[in-house]
Amino acid sequence: MLSKLRHFSSATREKSNDFQLEAEMSLLQRQLGLDLTDIKRIQGGTLGLGFIARINGQPRFLKTHTFEPGRQTLKKEWSIFSCLYQSILHVEAIDIEYEDEIRFWLIMDSLSSIADLDTKQAYQLIKNHNHFLAKSLDLSVIPNKDNFELLIKEGQKALLNLTMNYLISNTVQQYTHAYLHHLKTQSSNFPPHLCHGDFSPSNVMLKNSIPILIDWEDAFWGIEDYDYLYWLTFIKNRQFLSSTALASTAWDKHTAIAIMVLIIIIKCEISFLSGSYINNKISFDKRIMEVINIA
């Protein structure tokens, strides 16, 4: 979430230029020396621009960044992909210079969507991925400053901002403040743990029946089981919200709920900053209270 928060907090964030992207695509095709056809823009995505195309007749996925800081987050994603899936996916990274800008492109096999996961499948999938990366990845690609303590600070700032803009009630503000205070006082007891940072249902894909976890741009030094608790906060997964769903984590129920409250308050802040909250069908209060009511 940190990358998304930075993106929407920036008053100078860039917008994509379709004409420039078309020119870059032509440069990309010439540099590859391949036939690039049937290019289709994929809708959605906050930090990057995604495309499906055929390269020499084979479906491929192409991704680039929409703003300069996104270059580093995309390089981080490429490093993680190369580590996790080098024997499964064909992944390339290419720099394309256009006028005064150098844009980084990630190119890999096209993937198919996966059926919905249940809590056990989600828990095991993220556990396996994070365990493998902790042993195999060059961990220097994850900035030390991107950690759970920073996330708590951002949560406190988000709570203040949402309160000042009358987007949450006094009751929810008090509950949230108490949970964030709990995390702050306990943070020294949380060993750093490599996390995906955006483990959502839409970020799990398939390659030859093998689950592929995409969009590692928000990878950071979180804490154990953060990704699983993050997965539970999605609207699509509200059906799983229960004490039973929290029992498998490393944390007591109060701490697990506090982590989820932190995640949701920052999600609410991102929604507010981006303007997407206007179309929300569920209020910020309701989203937060659904988790708190697990207690």
Image (cartoon, rainbow, N blue to C red):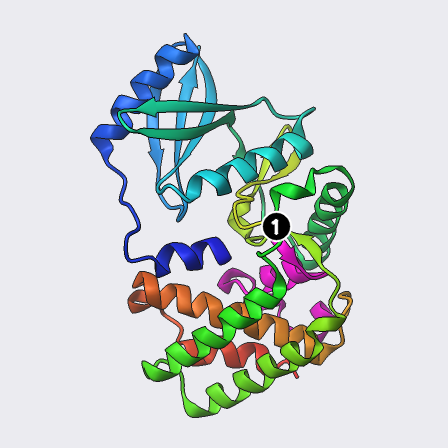
* Residue 65 can be seen, yes or no: yes
Up the image or down, 160 lies above or below 31; here it is below
Give the SS element for disc 1.
loop
Type of residue at label 1? His
Tell me which residue sits at (24%, 29%) in the image: 20
Screen quadrant of the C terminus: bottom right
Tell me which residue sits at (35%, 43%) in the image: 67
Asked if residue 189 lies left or right of residue 291, the reply is: right
Asked whether 233 falls inside the magenta stretch, the response is: yes
Question: Looking at this view, is 213 or 25 the one in front?
Answer: 25
Residue 144 location in percent, x, y? 62, 53
- State the predominant SS element of the stretch in magenta: helix
Up the image or down, 75 lies above or below 270; here it is above
* Residue 1 can be seen, yes or no: no
- Quarter of the image for residue 77 reads top right
Residue 60 location in percent, x, y? 47, 23
Asked if residue 170 lies left or right of residue 147, the reply is: left
- Quarter of the image for residue 7 reads bottom left
Asked whether 15 falls inside the magenta stretch, the response is: no
Tell me which residue sits at (54%, 46%) in the image: 203
> Which residue carries the number 1 mark?
196
Residue 197 location in percent, x, y? 58, 54
How many numbered callouts?
1
Q: Residue furthest left?
A: 19
Asked if residue 14 lies left or right of residue 181, the reply is: left
Magenta highlight range:
220-246
Asked if residue 220 lies left or right of residue 191, the reply is: left
The 10 Å Cα crowd at callout 1, few under 14, some 14 to 19, many 20 or more, is many
Residue 97 location in percent, x, y? 35, 23
Tell me which residue sits at (69%, 76%) in the image: 255
